Image (cartoon, rainbow, N blue to C red):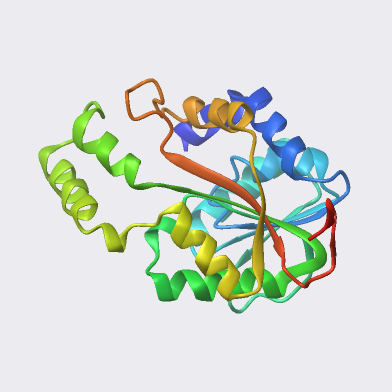
Amino acid sequence: MAGARERLRTGWDARLALVRDICPRGARVLDVGSSWGEYTLLPLAAVASEVVALDVDTRPLAWLSMFAAERDVTNVTTTVESVHDHRGSYDLLRCTNTLQLLSGTERVAFLSSFRRLLTSEGDLFVDFYTPRYLAFRVRYQKGLGLRLRLVSAARLALWRHTLTVRRFQAETGAVGLRIERHVDSAVYDRCREHEGNDFSTPLGRYFAAFVVVRDDGGWSKHGYR
């Protein structure tokens, strides 16, 4: 809990800049896999009209509720359930550090649920680490034990089991979603570097971040497609 409190106190400017880039003011937001609320509490709650923090683990949500009460944040509610069971309609869904952990079948199911929960003009913000992250863990990450290096090397060798940008594009299209834009790397990288990631190695960036929209045909928010 002490580490969570420290993360809430630091890096505020970077997280707020990212939220302002992806979240319209006054939006209704669902934070999928919110954990203890690093993004839910301060940056999202400062911009959105309502934030629903969804997670399957009760303990981090209890921390989130406590942190919200300490900071007099009143527009955040929590729910313990799977995204597949959740009902509602949202202007923005946020899901980070999750999709690369799922199998292809599970990921498509998640994306289908995301589409169902989005308003017709809503946005989905997602990120995931690419195979370069596994190479980073094998070659450059400091303090990583031998077992985890070997696991990363094995996953990297089994390329078909890792999430790539091309695979993600195909999966979003299969469920009626479409990548609207890449998230500005400078804004996003500041948040990731604050979390301890190192993009200064020869491998460069090893995360991909996108705003995804429903692909219903016709006009999008940024013109005809």
- The residue lying furthest to the top in this view is 200
Q: Is residue 216 left or right of residue 161?
A: right
Is 31 drawn above or below residue 173 in the view shown?
above
Residue 219, position in %: x, y? 86, 63
Residue 14, position in %: x, y? 64, 26
Is 164 drawn above or below residue 176 in the view shown?
above
Is 140 drawn above or below residue 183 in the view shown?
above
> Quarter-wise, where is residue 202 in the image?
top left
Residue 77, position in %: x, y? 72, 57
Is 41 drawn above or below residue 201 in the view shown?
below
- The residue lying furthest to the bottom in this view is 85
Work out whether residue 206 or residue 216 is closer to the camera in this orientation and state it. Answer: 216
> Quarter-wise, where is residue 61 in the image?
bottom right
- The residue lying furthest to the front in this view is 225
Q: Residue at x 53, y 51 (%)?
A: 35
Q: Is residue 145 left or right of residue 140?
A: left
Q: Is residue 104 left or right of residue 174?
A: left
Q: Is residue 83 visible?
A: no
